[in-house]
Image (tube, coloured by chain):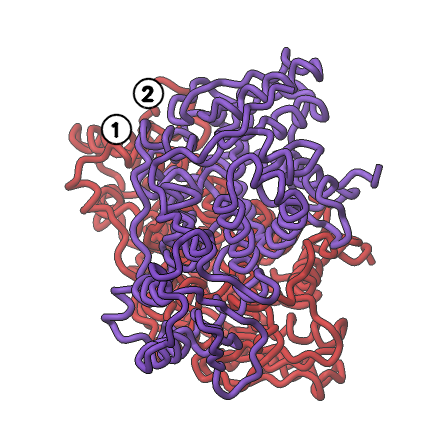
Chain colours: A red, B purple
């Protein structure tokens, strides 16, 4: 397998990496007594966050309780500056401080994050306007042709070896799996997702498919292998494509699958199916109209299209830390914004399925494997990177559990296409997941 | 059964009823030669409509061909004034002239209407702005509390005896049926729809359900009978409620089903399920926010809601004739407008299914029965009424076939509800339709 070598995170926008443990004590002030207004600030911060069941342990060991409830988690603030950083921009600072080891957590990290999300979601409805303005997330960076390359490189070119440590061993799927029953393994659920997508597209041998944003190419190979279709799969991540092509050759599928290193906006030709799994999050709202027009010209009159994407119940910016440190340019659309893509293209929405809790389960499986490989990850990068990714995975689990993120699979056709499936019964004729090996 | 007596259409807004056949010949000018500019006007009208495969037969028998294609249909214009009326406002005049017998059709009426819709849909993209303005549909009338009563009375209180002539004999369903297989009878497909809705709501014995806009009460009784749930069903059509209550008593379901004569906006209490089948079309965009808030307060934390409604692929006003003569106040939302209801209430959209072609088939079944009972309908009302309803049914079949109308079933929950179905597999465990009796 053509595995890219592990490398450092590209230096697009890096947080302050100062690890409290490596600073001289006098610089961190981590030995001094908290001031009374610092205790007040902690109490205020917790009220603004809706009083979640969290206690704070300050740098000197002093504990501040959450008031009228039993704490379920402890946040450990290791120096006074960490408190000020947290208060001034919690969305960004929480992840940065955790990554730097200046904030730590006792208790289950995803559960703490979920409690925090639920509590903040309620509380923010009562925030004064100045606080809303101070703490708001900022617009994602641009997603033009060249920026998109930079954004995608930042995340997806971290090295295949890294992703192989914790993604499924079946098809390297870095998107929501489909747990048609809750006890599936990650591998089964990822294969079930691929099968579910193929069924929704009603693929038949000899059909042609175009895929926008193909990751490591697993869906394209699955379609070719199990449905005998021809696939053109586009991606701008060089690392992923190298792996995808190698796999297709090894599995003798390269006569059916062509991986194209190009932006989705340059897709040519007309196809029986248009599919995109986990790319829309990176497209950016400003490009929805162009995407819609692209699908309109790429889909045959009788074709079906499927978009699979993280989304929202209502419009909201991506969490600042995720957008800045993990997924530059990311924006998950609300269901209404998602539908504007379909409306603009005069498409007919046939089927929407929300797999929100499936993504929470997928991420839990990833996180278990990630934690089991933490030492290897740290050896590849450093402790800061490992902690940042742990926070990202935990925060994502929490966001899907708390309902602040959704996962939409949307199937649509041209508005005047009458060759439609009679019902969705055929999707459920037999299990989508393979039996356990 | 408590059948309301047949009555005349309420006099809210009535078209000119002059039937050409009953006017003296000199007044209609139906014996004179067409002027050359009248021939030009017909040709121009057909070009503006995208040159559908239709020929015109004028009042004197003269035929004007559609140009370069074989005509599949003939439109018979019976007097010169009909031509001018048609040209000045075709959306409204086509139905009015047909109803009055001043315009007639050779060929299958739904097929003609479908050809016309498809052709106009293409052609209007090239219309000059003045024509778009001249021919545009107008905003639907108001849907406040008192207007809603008037609007609903206009259509639904035509008399149960009338609707019994052509709706299914099982549960008097005046909404889209569910043809899980294409060969179902109307009765089977309507029962399958009721079953499909119950399954989507995951009803269990002892649950409570509130229904907004219950028609003749069939869904409420079905839920009580087959799922042992308690239903509060709201409606403001007195005729329908009389029938619904009588049926519940006769079937000994009145301990489970309570029919409430009140506006949906006055729903009280909290329920395990909120359901509304075929009411949203009458709600009006200006009331979506209030509807959203109503569902928010009426749905228990773990509850599921289902809205079933005619919709659009993109925002567009209801056809002027349908809104004026058949469904006052009607507005089918685009999928995006539909989603604003969910976004406003912070709901999580779980499942959207589009049953567009199922509605075309439902309407075809209705139209066959309607045509078979045409003499009875004319005896109840008059020839004008019968022709108007034939046009309405044919036009609706055409609109669903041509893709200018959709049928969306949307299931959603509160945004923080995690007690969600694992998948949609359970909806398809066995056929929803009963076996043929």
Q: Are marks 2 and 1 in contact (CB under 8 Å)?
A: yes
Mark earlier in primary sequence (2, 1) = 1
Question: Measuring 32% from the left and 40% from the top, which residue is drawn there?
Answer: A77
**Residue most extreme to the top:** B255
Q: Is residue B115 above or below residue B153?
A: below
Chain letter for the residue marked with disc 1 in the picture: A
Q: Is residue B38 above or below residue B413?
A: below
Same-chain status of marks 2 and 1? yes
Secondary structure category for the residue under label 2: loop
Q: Quadrant of the N terminus of chain B?
A: top right
- Can residue A367 be seen from the camera position used here? no
Question: Measuring 36% from the left and 31% from the top, which residue is drawn there?
Answer: B150
What residue is disc 1 on?
A: A43
Of residues A432 and A374, which is closer to you in this image? Answer: A432
Residue B160, position in %: x, y?
57, 29
Which corner quadrant of the image does residue B221 belong to?
A: top right
Q: Is residue B19 above or below residue B249?
A: below
Residue B313, position in %: x, y?
45, 59
Chain letter for the residue marked with disc 2 in the picture: A
What residue is disc 2 on?
A: A67
Question: Measuring 75% from the left and 73% from the top, which residue is drawn there?
Answer: A227
Q: Quadrant of the C terminus of chain B?
A: top right
Q: Is residue B134 above or below residue A237?
A: above
Of residues A327 and B407, which is closer to you in this image? Answer: B407
Secondary structure category for the residue under label 1: helix
Residue B126, position in %: x, y?
34, 77
Residue A222, position in %: x, y?
70, 71
- Can residue A418 be seen from the camera position used here? yes
Of residues A325 and B115, which is closer to you in this image? Answer: B115
């Amino acid at each position: 397998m053509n595995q890219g070598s592990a490398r450092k995170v590209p230096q697009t926008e890096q947080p302050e990496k100062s690890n409290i443990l490596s600073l001289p004590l006098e610089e961190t002030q981590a030995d001094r007594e908290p001031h009374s207004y610092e205790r007040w600030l902690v109490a205020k911060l917790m009220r603004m966050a809706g009083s979640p069941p969290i206690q704070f342990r300050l740098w000197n060991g002093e504990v501040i309780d959450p008031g009228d409830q039993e704490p379920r988690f402890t946040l450990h603030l290791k120096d006074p500056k960490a408190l000020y950083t947290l208060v001034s921009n919690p969305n960004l600072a929480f992840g940065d401080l955790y990554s730097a080891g200046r904030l730590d957590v006792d208790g289950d990290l995803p559960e703490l994050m979920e409690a925090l999300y639920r509590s903040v979601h309620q509380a923010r409805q009562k925030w004064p306007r100045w606080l809303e303005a101070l703490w708001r997330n900022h617009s994602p960076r641009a997603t033009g042709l060249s920026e998109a390359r930079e954004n995608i490189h930042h995340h997806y070119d971290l090295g295949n070896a890294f992703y192989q440590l914790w993604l499924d061993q079946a098809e390297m799927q870095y998107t929501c799996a489909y747990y048609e029953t809750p006890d599936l393994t990650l591998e089964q659920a990822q294969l079930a997702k691929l099968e579910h997508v193929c069924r929704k597209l009603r693929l038949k041998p000899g059909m042609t498919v175009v895929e926008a944003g193909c990751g490591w190419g697993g869906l394209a190979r699955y379609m070719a292998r199990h449905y005998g279709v021809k696939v053109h799969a586009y991606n701008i991540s060089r690392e992923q494509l190298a792996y995808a092509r190698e796999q297709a050759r090894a599995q003798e599928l390269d006569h059916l699958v062509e991986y194209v290193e190009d932006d989705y906006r340059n897709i040519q030709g007309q196809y029986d199916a248009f599919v995109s799994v986990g790319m829309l999050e990176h497209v950016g709202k400003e490009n929805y109209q162009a995407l819609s027009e692209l699908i309109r010209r790429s889909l045959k009159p009788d074709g079906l299209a499927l978009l699979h994407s993280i989304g929202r119940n209502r419009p909201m910016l991506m969490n600042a830390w995720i957008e800045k440190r993990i997924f530059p340019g990311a924006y998950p659309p609300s269901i209404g914004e998602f539908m504007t893509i379909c409306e603009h293209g005069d498409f007919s929405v046939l089927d929407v399925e929300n797999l929100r809790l499936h993504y929470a389960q997928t991420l839990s499986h990833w996180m278990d494997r990630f934690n089991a490989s933490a030492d290897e990850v740290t050896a590849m990068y450093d402790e800061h990177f490992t902690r940042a990714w742990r926070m990202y995975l935990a925060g994502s689990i929490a966001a899907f559990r708390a309902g602040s993120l959704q996962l939409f699979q949307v199937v649509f056709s041209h508005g005047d296409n009458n060759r439609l499936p009679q019902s969705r019964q055929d999707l459920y004729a037999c299990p989508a997941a393979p039996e356990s090996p």
